Image (cartoon, rainbow, N blue to C red):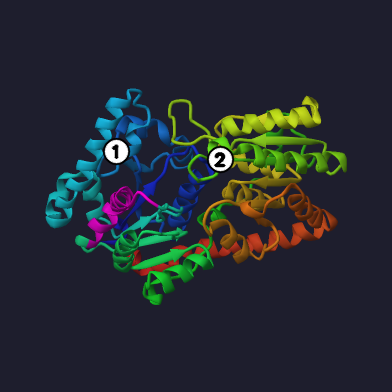
Amino acid sequence: MSAESKSITIVHGLPDTNSGGSALGIALVNVLLRAFPKARLSYVSSHADPEIIRTAYPFILEEHPDLEILPYPVRARSDNYLTRSSLVRKLKNVWWVFATLGSVIFLVFPFLGRWNRTLRHVGDSSVVISRGTQIFYDKKGHILQSLLSKYWLCIPLLYAWRVKVPFVVYAQTIGPIHSPWVRKFMQFVLRKATYVLPREQYSYDYLKNDLEIDVDKIVLVPDSVFGLESPTDEEIERVCDEHQLQRGKFACLVVRHYMEKGSEGQSKPLCDQFVELAKHIIDNNICEQIVVATQCHHLPEYTGFECDSKISHELLERLTAALGADRVKLIDKPLSPREAMCIYGAAKYLVSVRLHAAIFSMISGTPAIAVSYWGSKTRGIFQMLGFDDAFIEKEEMTGNGLIAKLDRIEHDYAGYCDSMAKKVSNAYQQAQQTPHTFAELVSS
């Protein structure tokens, strides 16, 4: 195979509703094209329905209009989100179970995959890459559902293994995995990988010590999003004009519901803590305005499985009651990664429950405080960067705790920004080098 015909298939391409998730895809494509300019790239959706795929990726296609987006090789549960009838939805979920179990035939008889468009791409690839995110975990209980879901996620990787195509798990957080059955399955899959690239030390240690993956396969790398370039002053000013924002005069808050079951009804404590912080910011003239932004939002023609709009409106209502309508603003719309970076880059501070909002902010030059709400990803990534005091565990979060962290930055704002810029620049350089970890798979 010539260098010109080398191909890379990226799997686990989640839709663009979450601008952080969208940025993971955009940044990965950027660095791969930079490292392997002659390679052909394909991007496999987490949906199997072509009509859904057509509307789910506006931002990555804006950046890379020639990128081929392929359907998932087996029907996806997410294809059923918009089915209104509960009976029809249940029937489709049963269909998903049988389709997922039936896909075993492709692993037993790999030549049958040649009749599946996406598996054919996988089989013709030089390397398959599982795009950066956190998908290899489970929640306590529902063992059979968790095991089936993890098998479904791993179908392209297992097929690559069966047809002797190397695969790489790229810049991911791994775990927590509670079920011993899911743990054994993930051990099996990850041991077949050519490389597993955790994006923080906790996942590295978990892979090494708990899952007992060969350390020669494990390489610690930055989160993929650090591979993005910061927006220019002109871009930031244009977005400020569009949203009527005064650069450096506002603090930005980004909220989401927590991951635990029933967390949708537990937004009051989170809003209380953010309102307490906002009052401190306004009362002490740190900023003139508080802006709430929805990082995860349904698209005009696509409805995803989560959206931050409802909880953002709840926070806006609480802030308005506490501070007055003239002091608060809500940006409630789908944000491209670039637009989000510009909004956060125009702020003086960002405080976020969305990890990648905090990363966007730091890339754009704005200090961020992140709430670590699930697993090790936020804590691990911030510690790896050297920002041990710029995150807070949700179980330990109070309004006073957030205020103390912000005041420590405010005490030496310019010095903090200089230190942050150096650390982010170092992470950017490392992110550009990540593809060279497996360069022999593409250039040989």
Identified at 29% across, 60% down, the residue is 126
Residue 385 on image: x %, y %: 62, 64
Q: Is residue 271 magenta?
A: no
Residue 281 on image: x %, y %: 81, 42
Q: Is residue 153 magenta?
A: yes
Specify whether 414 is left or right of 299. right
Identified at 35% across, 50% down, the residue is 11
Question: How many C-alpha atoms fall within 10 Å of the one at disc 2: few (<14), some, or many (≥20)?
Answer: many
Residue 61 on image: x %, y %: 44, 38
Query: CB under 8 Å between callouts 1 and 2?
Result: no
Q: Which mark is residue 48?
A: 1
Q: Which residue lies furthest to the front in this view?
A: 141
Closest to the observer, 221 or 409: 409
Magenta stretch, main secondary structure, is helix
Identified at 79% across, 31% down, the residue is 322
User: Is there any visible trace of residue 401 in the rendered image?
Assistant: yes
Specify whether 370 is left or right of 129. right
Disc 1 or disc 2, which is closer to the eye? Answer: 2
On the rendered image, what quadrant is the N terminus found in? bottom left
In primary-sequence order, the first of circles 1 and 2 is 1
- Residue under label 2: 257
